[in-house]
Amino acid sequence: MRYDGRDDYEEYYDDYDAYEEYEEPQPYFLTARDLIFFCLAFMTPTAATVLYGTAQPAAHGTLSGSYIVALVIALLTILSYRRLGRAFPEGGSVLTYVGYGIHFRAGYYAGWTALFFYIVAASSFFMIGADAAAALFDPIPRIFWLILIAAVSGIVVIFGQRLSALALTVIVLGVIGITAIYILVCFMSADKLADANAAAATAAADATGGEGGSFGLGPLMSGAALACLAFLGFDSVTTLSIDAANPKRDTGKAMAVACLCAAALFFFQAMASSAIIPDYTQLDPQSAVSGIALMAGGPTLHNMVSLATILSAFGVGIAATTAGSRMLRILREEFSPSGGEGAHGADGGSISSIFPQTGTSPINVVACLAAALVIALIMPEGASGLAFDLARFAGMICFMTVNASALIFFWFKRHDHVYVRSIIIPAAGFLFSLWSWINIDPSAFGIGVIFALVGVIIVAASFLYERLVLGIGPAPDKGGQ
């Protein structure tokens, strides 16, 4: 009989076979659909709901047209993001694009600004969602909902991209469905409320000595300056470029498709709302859409709109926390002399090994959530508008720097002397973003300047630390490659 030495080492071979059968968990690479839903979760229809009470009066009743102008502004910036994303598909978002396009120190500053935007955007929707939930479920205090929304958002992000993509898909479809119901009910109820609307319009005309509203380029552009806020967040998907299956193709496509879909929802939502209350002077800045929902569909539609607001808070929390934690990781890697460890590196130690799909350290996730939650807690109730303006302050800086980077990189470094794509488009995107930025409320602008100066101090401190303490010389310019 043949002797088989395996019998003497049966335990060893069993362990070896088990080792061969074990497979490392594979990272989940995001598809174009995942990226589109990620963008739509950030550009939630609830943003237009919150803005309506202030943006419609600013536009003198022409907010639907203002959304078209805001869409054009967003598409100009998307073209700059798309070209830079194809030139640098390795990821890094605004930090990489500005760093290669202008200067790597400018890239650090842009990354800091983007991180500030993600955190403030999350905190603003934490407040909006908590306010809606506290009103809908009256006995439960507001602080409970703030903590719950933040905690659930963090847990979903920590457990990985697959769960995050699934959660955002469900949330976005739910919010879009409720928004579609709101639009249909408003249009169907407009005829029933026609007599009351006519009486209100006549009373407003008598009180003001003329018509209740007037169309003009000035009001249209004023409304667009506020409407731009509803489109902020599409650029956050560029932080996930390295986790996409096909970043060169899918990232730009996701931003464009998401903006077009969001613009359609914003446009018809504004049209439907104005059909119920045509006189914009009668709108409550804080709860205009909630009041319209109550008029058009009663308590049922009102509660559905509140539910959409709560769902949106979870969606923005997940998307903003994902983008913020990725940007924080990129900033840490760029500031670290030893460099980073890759998109799926274990920069979080043993915790990241437990959650291999996270894509970044759970400590980064907790840090972003903690900052957003602290901002939401220290701000008084009803201050979500201030947080919105702070987000616009930071977001427009990102837009300006990306458009400037596209112009400098392609025209001066790549010598792509095609005027339309290398000068006109990025210059127009820069000027429109600058115009929206300078129209921010002065109080929010002042607070934003403080955070902007903090970013300057951080970048300057890192420069001095590298030169004086570490003795590291200037980094090579990769933009000309």
Image: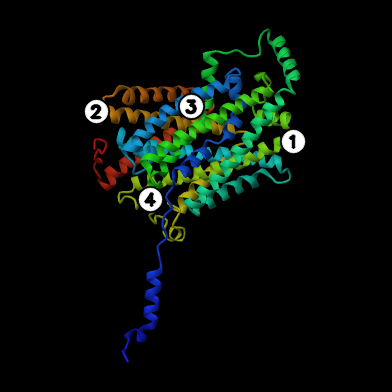
Task: Say what amino acid the circle numbered 3 marks.
Answer: Leu
Residue 167 drawn above or below residue 443: below
Q: Do the residues labelled 1 and 3 touch (CB within 8 Å)?
A: no
Can residue 390 be seen in this snapshot?
no
Residue on which disc 4 sits? 343
Q: Is residue 291 left or right of residue 219?
A: right
Q: How is the image coloured?
A: rainbow
Mark positioned earlier in the residue sequence (4 or 2): 4
Q: How far apart are marks 3 and 2 (CA)?
A: 29 Å
- Residue at image location 64% in from the left, 30% down from the top: 183
Q: How far apart are marks 1 and 2 (CA)?
A: 60 Å
Q: What is the number of callouts on the image? A: 4
Secondary-structure class at tag 3: helix
Write down the quadrant of residue 78 in the picture.
top left
Q: Is residue 77 left or right of residue 413?
A: right
Mark positioned earlier in the residue sequence (3 or 4): 3
x and y percent of residue 416 in the render?
Answer: 26, 28
Residue on which disc 2 sits? 415
Label at residue 36:
none
Residue on which disc 1 sits? 299
Residue on which disc 3 sits? 71
